[in-house]
Amino acid sequence: MRKIPKAVAIASVLLVIATPAFAQSRFNPDGSFWVIGQPPEGFSDFGGINLNARRSRRLPAQGLELSNGKKFSFKTATVKRDKLSFTTSTIGGVYYTFVGKFLRGGVFAEQDLSDEQPVLEGMLTKYKNGQKIAEAKMKFSYFGGT
């Protein structure tokens, strides 16, 4: 019987132990996020936030969407397990910023999430001609598409 070097044996054990943890730590929030309850004052036309980092054809393009279908693409965006922040493009002098965090991890499309279960919360701010015109802390539910 051939003797396995100690370093190889330790590396093999660590790989076996770390693999389930790595698989569980996958994070993919791609989908749509809708306000839970009625939109706050100043956001009556707000539709939702769309994340689509993998550019899936079955999901809407990334950005913020109004209830009338107008879409604001992300000018800048950070999507991490502990932070979502973005600034949208400007349309007609209006743009939005958001700073928040995800309330859970994992691959959202693989989870059974209700439309009343908050998965994202943060501060949405609306600007017109560079002036803040509305700001509200909101909670969002997840919708993964059809």
Image (tube, grey):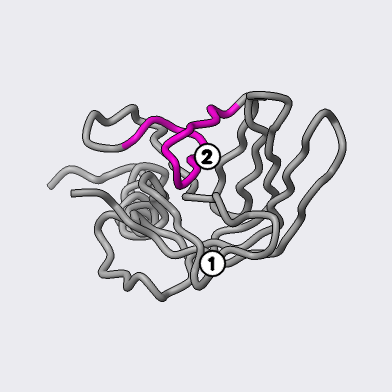
Look at the image and tell me whether residue 49 can be seen.
yes
The location of residue 7, given as percent across then percent down, is 42, 44
Does 51 appear above or below 81?
above
The mark lying in front, picked from 1 and 2, is 2
The residue carrying pointer 1 sits among few (fewer than 14), some (14 to 19) or many (20 or more) residues within 10 Å by Cα, namely some
Residue drawn 81% across the image and 47% down it: 133
Q: Is residue 5 left or right of residue 78?
A: left
Residue drawn 45% across the image and 58% down it: 34
Disc 1 residue type?
Leu
The location of residue 108, given as percent across then percent down, is 34, 57
The residue carrying mark 1 is 103
The location of residue 23, given as percent across then percent down, is 32, 53
Earlier residue among tags 1 and 2: 2
Q: Secondary structure at mark 2?
A: strand
Q: Give the number of callouts.
A: 2
Q: CA distance from mark 1 to mark 2?
A: 20 Å
Disc 2 residue type?
Leu
The location of residue 15, given as percent across then percent down, is 34, 49
For this orientation, the residue located farthest to the left is 1
Pick whichever, 1 or 126, lies toward us.
Answer: 126
Residue drawn 41% across the image and 49% down it: 29
Residue drawn 32% across the image and 69% down it: 113
For this orientation, the residue located farthest to the right is 131
The residue carrying pointer 2 sits among few (fewer than 14), some (14 to 19) or many (20 or more) residues within 10 Å by Cα, namely many
Where residue 128 sits, quadrant-wise, is top right
Does 63 appear above or below 14?
above
Report the span colored magenta.
60-74
Q: Is residue 36 magenta?
A: no
The residue carrying mark 2 is 64
Q: Secondary structure at mark 1?
A: loop
Pick whichever, 124 or 39, lies toward us.
Answer: 39
Q: Is residue 61 magenta?
A: yes
